[in-house]
Each structure stands twice: as C-alpha cells, then as structure tokens.
Image: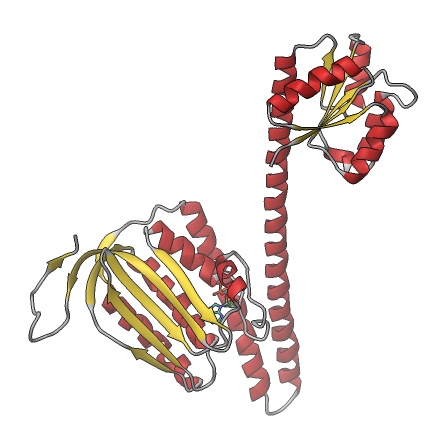
C-alpha cells in the first residue's frame, strides 16, 4: 500500500514541485491550499505525513498544527513544517506546538524526502511496539482474571467447607480450581523459560515410540474417568532428532487436549508413521472440533476457540507446542471439523528407523536418507 502525504501549501509552484517528487517515490499525494481545507481532509482521511506551510491565508500552519495535535486522530501524525521563516524562534515555535521536523525554504528535495521516509518508518515502528504492548497487556489481564477466579473459588468453598458437614463436593470444586491455577502457573513459567531460551534446545537422537507410550500411560486414568479409550494404532520404533523433554511436553499437551475436548465415551487414536524425510505423529479425537476459520488461530498465545469456555484452559498449550516443535525444526498442523473431531499432526526429522517386528526386523537399521 502506498503511503499518503498531505501537502498543505498555498503556493501552486511549490505544490507541483512537491507532488512531482513525492509521486516519483510512490507516495500518494493529497493537497490542501488552506489550513481549513487541510482540517477537512484529515477528518475523512488521516495521512501518513503532513507537510505543513506556516504562512497560509487565515488559519496559519501553527494553528493547524495546534488543532491537529489536540485531536485524537491527529495526535500522532508526523508533521514537517515548511516555511520561508528561518529564524530560530520560528523553528522552536513549530517544534513546541508538536511538529516533528522543520524545513526552511528553499529546501533540498532530497533532504525533505529523507526526512519523510524517516518519520514514516519511525511511526510504523511505534505502531508495532504499541500493538505488541497491547497484546501483552490483554494476555496479562486474562491470566490475572483466571487466577483471581480460581483463588475466589478456593477461598469461598474452603470457607463453606469449614462451616458445614459433608464437604466432599466443596473439596472437589476446590481441587479443580487449584489444579487449574497450578496448570496456569506451570504454563506461564514454562513459556518464559522457552521464550528466554530463544529456540536453542539441546538435540539428541531418540526413540519416539517409547516417549509416546510413556505419555499415553500418564493419561490412561484421566481418560478412563471420562470413559475415553486411547488407542495406540501402530508401534513403529523410530529414531528421530529432538529433545526428549520438549517432545514429552508436546505430546502431553496434545493428548491432554484430545481427552479434555473429547466427548464422554469417545476415543483417541495415536499413529506413528514413517514419512520420506521424517516421522509423523497424529493424535485424533472424537471431540467438539474447531471451526475452520478458527483452526489457524488456536496456535496463538492465549487463543481459545469459541465454545471452549466451559472447559478449563489458558490458551497456552498449543502455543507452547508450536514453539517447541519449531525449535526442534519440526512442524505441526491441525485438521478439524465441528462435531467431527480433530487431528493434530506433528512432524519430526528422522535420523534412522527401526521397524519394530520382533521376529523379522530384529537389529535391522535403515538409514533415513
Ligand atoms: P487450552 O486448552 O488451555 O485452552 P490450548 O492452547 O491447548 O489451550 O488450545 C487452544 C484452543 O484450541 C482451546 O481453547 C480449544 O478451543 C482449541 N483446541 C485445542 N485442542 C483441541 C481439540 N483437540 N479439540 C477441540 N478444540 C481444541
């Protein structure tokens, strides 16, 4: 998209000189021949930079600058003052009113172009920093809100429990809230460790199938409590390049979701498949599924899909999965449909594979490439 420059100038030859040079640099140009016209234009379309002459009929450039800076929209638009007045006082007055820069006529077009570019780039960087800060602020608010809720439940129900007989239900509620708070804090502390590590995970060669089996065992009881069956479809022993702690965490997050978002009595299938250049692990569930346009967003930090509100979560699990997988040079994808279930597939880079068939393939090692 072309950036827009508003020229506020009453001398036609200066306007044409500026227009010619700006259009040559691919800027879109708007022109106001008076201060009043400039204020009308910015009501409809705020430019990326304003080139503002001071000596204008009626409303002068200083007044226009003051009005722009007083409004919500014009508060941050970059303004370069253009003027024949070269005194230090005039320059100081322009800058005091909030102009970003000052150019005296006759000016060097090259210098002016450089100043415009610099201001636009600075503005873009500022906007990016502000957006990031806002995103972090929202995430923090969400986390604080969730932790406060859990603490309220723990506090309130434990107080009730202390006063009443037969407190099993209260204890159960306290237990769920405490587990939620603990899992939130675990996720956040893990996340800060991963983010600070900046992607440098120690890599080793390891057998993926034994980790899969280990993780499945961890979830058997939780799954059983919801009558969910976990089916390990094939047992291919495959050597991959990765970090065992990270892989364990990835599989735990995915399997936890496959159980958590599954229907009561549903099934979870786990498949380990050898591919041309690696190993794919797929985890399929028969749960609520995810709407198509939401699927790419579920890997974003703190994102929770519509309909998940009743199920405890922080929207961090898949973000952590993605960070870990990418740090190991792998990939993750999701295919899902509402009411049908979801399949999450992680692809690891293979080192060597061993087919696990005790009779036929004992000691047989195949190199991947
Ligand atoms: P959490 O489960 O703590 O909310 P995740 O980052 O693990 O966070 O998942 C993000 C969102 O993606 C979830 O809130 C849920 O909406 C959706 N999701 C993840 N896994 C599944 C799944 N297997 N089935 C349906 N929805 C899922």
Front-lying residue, 139 or 1: 1
Picture residue at 79% right of the left edge, 16% below the top: 12
Q: Position of residue 255 (x, y in %)?
A: 39, 71
Which residue is most to the bottom?
Answer: 166
Decide if residue 114 is on the left or right side of residue 11.
left
Tell me where residue 111 sits by quadrant: top right
Picture residue at 59% right of the left edge, 45% below the top: 132
Q: Position of residue 234 (x, y in %)?
A: 24, 74
Q: Position of residue 153 (x, y in %)?
A: 63, 74
Picture residue at 90% right of the left edge, 19% below the top: 57
Q: How many circles with numbers are drawn on the protein? A: 0
Q: Eyeballing the image, is 244 above or below 90?
A: below
Q: Eyeballing the image, is 305 above or below 170?
A: above
Tell me where residue 98 sits by quadrant: top right
Q: What's the colour scheme?
A: secondary structure
Decide if residue 81 is on the left or right side of residue 253.
right
**Image quarter hosting the N terminus:** top right
Tell me where residue 116 sits by quadrant: top right
* Res 72 visible: no
Decide if residue 343 is on the left or right side of residue 207.
right
Front-lying residue, 30 or 162: 30
* Res 63 visible: yes
Q: Position of residue 126 (x, y in %)?
A: 63, 36
């Amino acid at each position: 998209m072309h950036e827009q420059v508003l020229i506020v100038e009453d001398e036609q030859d200066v306007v044409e000189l500026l227009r010619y040079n700006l259009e040559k640099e691919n800027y879109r140009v708007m022109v106001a021949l008076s201060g009043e016209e400039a204020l009308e234009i910015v009501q409809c379309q705020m430019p990326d930079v304003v080139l503002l002459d001071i000596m204008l009929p009626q409303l002068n450039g200083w007044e226009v600058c003051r009005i722009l800076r007083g409004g919500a929209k014009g508060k941050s638009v970059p303004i370069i003052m253009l003027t024949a007045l070269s005194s230090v006082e005039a320059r100081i007055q322009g800058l005091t009113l909030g102009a970003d820069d000052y150019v005296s006529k006759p000016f060097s077009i090259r210098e002016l172009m450089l100043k415009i570019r610099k201001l636009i780039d600075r503005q873009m960087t500022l906007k990016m920093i502000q957006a990031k800060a806002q995103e972090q602020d929202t995430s923090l608010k969400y986390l604080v809100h969730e932790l406060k809720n859990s603490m309220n439940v723990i506090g309130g129900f434990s107080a009730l429990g202390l006063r009443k007989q037969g407190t099993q239900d209260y204890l159960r509620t306290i237990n769920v809230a405490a587990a939620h708070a603990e899992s939130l804090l675990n996720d956040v502390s893990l996340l800060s460790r991963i983010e600070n590590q900046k992607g440098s995970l120690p890599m080793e060669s390891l057998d993926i199938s034994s980790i899969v089996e280990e993780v499945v065992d961890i979830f058997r009881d939780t799954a059983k409590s919801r009558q969910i069956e976990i089916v390990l479809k094939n047992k291919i022993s495959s050597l991959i390049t990765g970090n065992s702690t990270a892989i364990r965490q990835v599989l735990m997050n995915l399997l936890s979701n496959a159980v958590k978002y599954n229907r009561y009595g549903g099934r979870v299938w786990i498949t380990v498949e050898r591919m041309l250049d690696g190993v794919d692990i797929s985890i399929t569930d028969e749960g609520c599924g995810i709407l198509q346009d939401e699927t790419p967003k579920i890997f974003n930090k703190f994102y929770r899909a519509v309909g998940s509100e009743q199920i405890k979560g922080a929207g961090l699990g898949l973000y952590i999965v993605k960070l870990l997988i990418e740090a190991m040079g792998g990939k993750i994808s999701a295919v899902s449909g509402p009411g049908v279930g979801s399949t999450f597939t992680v692809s690891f880079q293979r080192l060597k594979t061993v087919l696990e068939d005790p009779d036929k393939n004992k000691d047989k090692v195949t190199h991947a490439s």
